Amino acid sequence: MTMHGPATAKAVQAPVGEIGGIPLPTWRWILIGGGLVILAVIPFVTKNFYIFQITLALIYAIAILGLNLLTGFNGQFSLGHSAFYAIGAYTAAIMMENMGIHYAWTLPAAAIVCFVFGFLFGLPALRLEGIYLALATFALAIAIPQVLKSSVVEHWTGGVQGIVIIKPDAPFGLPLNSDQWLYLFTVLTAIVMYVCAANLVKSRTGRALIAIRDHPVAASAMGINVSLYKSLTFGVSALYTGVAGALGAIAIAFVAPDSFTFSLAVALFVGLVVGGVASIPGTIVGGFFVLFVPNIAEHFSKGLAGAVYGIILLLIIFVMPMGAAGLGRLITGKLMKQGR
Amino acid sequence: MELFLHQVLAGLATGGIYACMALAVVMIYQAIDHLNFAQGEMAMFSTFIAWQLIQWGIPYWLAFGLTIVISFAAGVVIERVVLKPIHDAPILSHVVAFIALLAILNSSAGFLWDWTIKSFASPFGSGQFLGQNLLSKHDAGMIGVTILMLVALYLFFRHTRIGLAMRAAAANPESARLAGIRVGWMNALGWGMAAAIGAVAGMLIAPVVFLEPNMMLSILLYGFAGAVVGGLTSPGGAVFGGFSVGVIENLAGTYIPVVGREMKLSIALCIIVAVLCVKPSGLFGRPVVTRV
């Protein structure tokens, strides 16, 4: 499945336009700065419940970022990212509960485990494309909850019951409750992950990934090792989603096989498309969509929540077929023309 | 040997369900070049319509026919209303539209007919087929109807003008349009036919798994698996794939000790992935060749 996203233009030097006399790169920094200020203020002005929800939205955003690296930038379709999310979550939970390891160490561990797993899964997946790859990843998504429940690994995973973990408190005697601390911990992790992803996509490697998506044959003619890059992308993508899974396990303080079913994979995929394929800031929109829109739908009507959700989804696809990122590009384009 | 034979036949019986669904999946894939995730929910909704008609006192076979006609029309309407406006959107947006359709159909079926499990009559009667104890009458009827549909579809696609036009529209829309084929309407027709086949599949499956809004979720998964194993470009392959998924699932559950009942789905899917790694376009599918 080849996806010709407008992000192809992004890899080339972005044309320097300006809106209201301020050049676009400056605007970008203003937006990023503003976003960071809002993120920093949130935990001190809202209720704990909202803080918890926004934490989860950010965690989903990281998971969607992982999926986007694979699907958006490398053109490999995955319906199985719930599996990597589950592996990350279980790595964190088992390390904390069974081995008594500090929660901060579970993130790098989950990252390594998921990278290895993703890379290994990426090797056979090399032979598959488009819908066939979707089916293989989909098989993974179906298999993981069943494997987690099975009696062979029950001793570690706690079977159907799952594992309850203890929510960590703020360290160094900081005057924060555990929700506020976890929020800040998530924000810090997210910032690191986003900076890394943005740099990765802009680098030589990132251009190689995009080249493979747009034209594998041409890419290999340019000397790019297509199989290696594809499996590595699978690994890195799994790494991102796995770290999100570990964060999710710590934030919810509970893991169970049924939280990681195929519907989670679908949710991540919907978040990816709504945010915008091959757009890094779009994944944040995606994360918030995944968390909040089903709740909003339920607010409209309890019995028809699914239908309302579906209609919202259809409307979004009608209004912005390229996702939030496409809409953003459209608006910047309009504003730039007006300024001229 | 007795056990083996029994498991194979039981696998064939459930495989018949998957084969039905796989056939509907391949049908729409031929017509629109996409996998339709809402296919199962469309079939479920059609089955509910049939159930409602029968509740109103309409005889079974009349309700059967009416449901097929209604489903066909509904399929065409869905294509015109939902998919035509986003025709130029990227493929991933299409997949999201399918997911949206799935959510809408599932939730409104639950709202209209509530979530309780309903029984659905079998047109073939109860009891065992030809007096043996391996295959029930309904299983045999289901396999028969699936094969009948397959033959009918084969004849339609191979030997009618409109079948040829539909294949052309799916394979190469631009050239087909230049040749005077109304590609948009061919897509709508494909949706209608897929909905109708889905309705038949749903009505055949419902007596076995009972009727409820979530009845199709897992069956669709097996249907996809069957279709992909057989090759998405080949209706016959899809039916074969559906049957083999049923058999593999049953045999793996019986003979691989660790697997048991709980993990047989995983094993079936693993085998499918293994098949795909050896033959990436399915057992009977044509490999996709692109011009560089």
Image: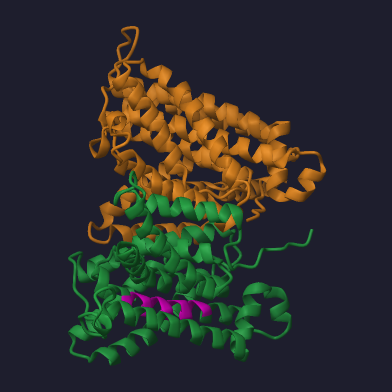
What number of labels is visible? 0
Q: Position of residue A287 (x, y in %)?
A: 44, 41
Q: Quadrant of residue B7?
A: bottom left
Q: In which quadrant will I find the N terminus of chain A?
A: bottom right
Say whether residue B234 is magenta: no
Name of the residue lying farthest toward the top: A172
- Would you say B278 lies left or right of A40 here? right
Does any portion of residue A105 appear in the rendered image?
A: yes
Q: Nearer the viewer, residue B17 or A320?
A: B17
Query: Residue A281 occupies which quadrant of the picture?
Result: top right
Magenta stretch, residue numbers: B190-204
**Viewer-proximal residue among B5 and A94:** B5
Chain corresponding to orange in the figure: A
Give the residue drawn at x 35%, y 61%: B217
Colour in which the image shows chain B:
green
Q: In the image, is residue B135 above or below residue A308?
A: below
The location of residue B266, given as percent across then percent down, is: 39, 50
At 33% from the left and 43% from the top, the residue drawn is B258
